Every structure is written in structure tokens, then in C-alpha cells.
Image (cartoon, rainbow, N blue to C red):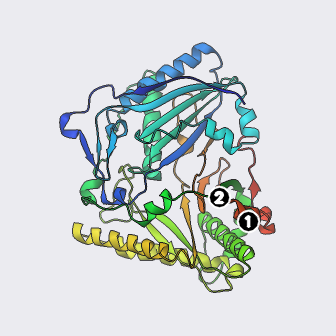
Amino acid sequence: MEITINSNEMIKPSSPTPPHLRSFKLSLLDQFVPTMYTPILLFFPAGNFSDDDHRQVRSRILKNSLSTFLTRYYPLAGRLNGNISVECNDEGVYYSEAEVDSSLLDVLREPEIETMKKLMPPKNKNDILFLVQVTFFECGGLSIGVCISHKFSDAASTTTVIRAWAAEAEAFMHHESILLVAPQLSSAAIFPPIDNLPMGKLADEFDKEKPRVVVRRYVFSASKIASLKEIAVSEEVRSPSRVEVVSAFLWRRTIRTIKLKLGTHRPLAIVWPVNLRARLLPPLGSDTFGNIAIPMVMEGQDESECEIKLSKLINVMRRGILEIDSKYGRELGTEELVGEIFKSYTEVGKILEKASEMDFHGHSSWCRFPLYEVDFGWGKPVWATIAYIEHPNTVVLMDARDDGAIEAWVSLKEEDMFIFEQDDDLSKFATLNPCPYV
């Protein structure tokens, strides 16, 4: 696939950010998050847009709507000021347009990580908080690759940002006037930042030199998930969710991989970010911008872990959720809330200190985030996914296009992935990298 970058520019807000909004404080939760990007890639079919005139129309709509959108989401057009704030200086977001000499179906038939990376904006723009690449296919279809700084945007916020921009574009497309709701940019008031707060051990781990990482995409169909649920049902777990069974299944497979690699048992801990928005009292709106999640740490079991039942691992997850609910699901004063946050991150730090004694992996779920509802004015995406994972020992779960199915992105060190993908149970319940659009 030949890709040609035709243009790149900085898109700035259509009107300047008022002086009193020029400094956007990071929240305490933002301060704990490493500086990295969250990459999302959306694919749209040609529909009735197959010629150059329509390409120019869509290009104009995307750029104009992005400029207007940034007046409400003005921190995205700013620049980080250390670990304290975003300077909302309207320097803009990176926007590029490209074209490829193949059809959309050529890419989707057998999606390759390296190909998908080419459809994303460049990663060497670390001072820019929001980057976009729009790629036009020869068939008239297009992809929109978005990178948003994780420093002040979690998965829920990233989804909200993309949907809000799309709503603005759809209004431009159909010449409609819509009521656009301003985002809730109040997380720093709820979770006050601390001056000179060090990034902490979690950030240190992300900043380490990364080994060679191999990424695989597995799809669990609704029928296979139903089979896993039947296996997981027990007296303690009467009704496991699809996210629980897929996560527990991959957790158990990873434990097995480690044992086969080392020839002996080695404990494994899972770190899972839990969305706090609906858990706080009073609850926060789903459009509250920022990192509004807390890490849940789930430590491994005994030496028979490789054969441990899915229900037992799901119980570990549920106990972790109940503990978070008991900590945060009550009315907390600011000082008490900050104290609980520090306790949670202290737990993560203690786990990381055991790096010589145990492995730790990160699991995250984007399921039920409505990326397949995104519509820029020419229809909903045929595939909405992350584009890549740069760090090892990571699992990201997302809704697949088929109702009830889950797309699991798994990253491991090269030598670990070689063992992991030989697992017979993995091939029994998951399909490796199928075409996402039939």
C-alpha cells in the first residue's frame, strides 16, 4: 500500500480562547498518568462520496467543524505546562490529509498493524495534544486517525471528544443548527492538583526503554463468549459479563504463558483502570473531561493458577470493584477524596516494587463506549478500533462490529507472544485478526 501525505497544517479554534480560560489545570488524577497518546482509528465506506469534488467537500467540513469544535474543547489546542496545567494558547491541533492507492476493503480484508500505523498521524509531535490524519482511499472511503494525549483524557473522554467533533461536522454537512453542549472541564476542582507532584512509578515504567513488542488482535464472537460464560458460571459467579469472561480467559492464558516460559510458577498482577464517574456521590456526568479513573490492582493466586477456574479470577475482579465502590461510592470531602486516590496509587507503586518477584500487566475495557455511533455526516464507521499498542503486557478490549462480540488487542514481548499464541484454548475461543467488515 502506497500512502502519500498531501497536506498538513495546524487547525486553530475559530475564535480565540478568552483570557480567563488561558490556563487549564490538570487534575490530581491527570498528574498520575504518563505522557502518551491514545490512538483511535475509524473507517468509513464511500457511500455516495466517490469523486474528487466530494473529497474536497468532506475535507472542508472536517477542517471547519474541527476549528469550531475547538472553541468549546479549547485545551486540546493548547500545550502542556509541565505536570501542572495546559497553556490554552490556541496554537492548534495537527491535521493532515493523505491518500492511498488501494481500496478500503483491501486494508480491512487482512488488517496489519504496520499498515494501520501509516493511517495515523505521526507520533513525534509530543508537544501537540490532539492530532488527526484523514486518509482517502481510491474507492472513495476514508479513515480518520486520532491521537489524543492521555495526560488529560481517558478512554471515556477520548470517545466524547470524537463524538462531539463528529456532531459538529454532521451539522456542517447538512447545514443544520444543533444544540452543542459544552464539556464539563471541572475535574481539577473535584480532584485538586498538587504542585511539584512527581510522576511516580507508573510513569517511570512507561518511560523505560521498551523491548520489542508484538501485538495481536483477537475477536471473540458472541457465541464463543456465551460458551465462556457457561464455563465461568459457579455458585459465586451466577451471571458473568462478557468483559469479565474475556478478561479472565486472557489472564489465565497469560499465566500459563509465563509458567511455560520459566518452567515454574511466577505471580501475575493485573492493573485495571476503573471509571469513577458513575461511582462518585454525587455522580459525575459522562461528559466530564479528564482522567476520571482509578487503578484497580488484582494480584495473582496460588501456584495452581494455570488451571484456576475462570470464576475464581472473576471473583478477584469483583472483589476489586466492590473495594473501589466502598472507597469512592460515598460522599467524600476533598481532602478525604485526595487521600483515597493516594492510597490507590500507593498500592500500584507497591506492586511495581515487586517487579523482580512478579509480572504485572494492564487490562482495560473500551466496551460500551459508543464509537460505532460516530457520524461525521456520511454514515457510521464500519470499523472503530485502536490503531496500535506500543507498550508490552497490555490488553485492550473493545466492542467488535458484530453485536455482542469483543475485539481484544494483546501486546506481549516477542518471546512471550510466541508461546502465548500456541495455546490451543486461545484458538478454540478466539479468531486471530479476522476481517472486521464483511
Residue 301 vertical position relative to residue 72 in the rendered view, above or below: below
Tell me the SS state at disc 2: strand
- Quadrant in which residue 381 is drawn: top right
What amino acid is found at the position of numbered circle 1 in the picture? Phe
Q: In terms of sequence position, does the residue under pointer 1 or pointer 2 come before the other?
A: 2
The N terminus sits in image quarter: top right
Residue 112 vertical position relative to residue 32 in the rendered view, above or below: above
- Left or right of 199? Residue 57 is right
Q: Which mark is residue 410?
A: 2
Q: CA distance from mark 1 to mark 2?
A: 10 Å
What amino acid is found at the position of numbered circle 2 in the picture? Val
- Left or right of 334? Residue 60 is right
Answer whether residue 375 is visible to the viewer in this image: yes
Name the foreground residue: 391 vs 223: 391
Q: Residues within 10 Å of mark 1 (few under 14, many from 20)?
A: many
Name the foreground residue: 49 vs 122: 122
| Residue at image point 70% right, 70% down | 253
Which residue corresponds to mark 1?
A: 420
- Is label 1 in contact with label 2 (beta carbons under 8 Å)? yes
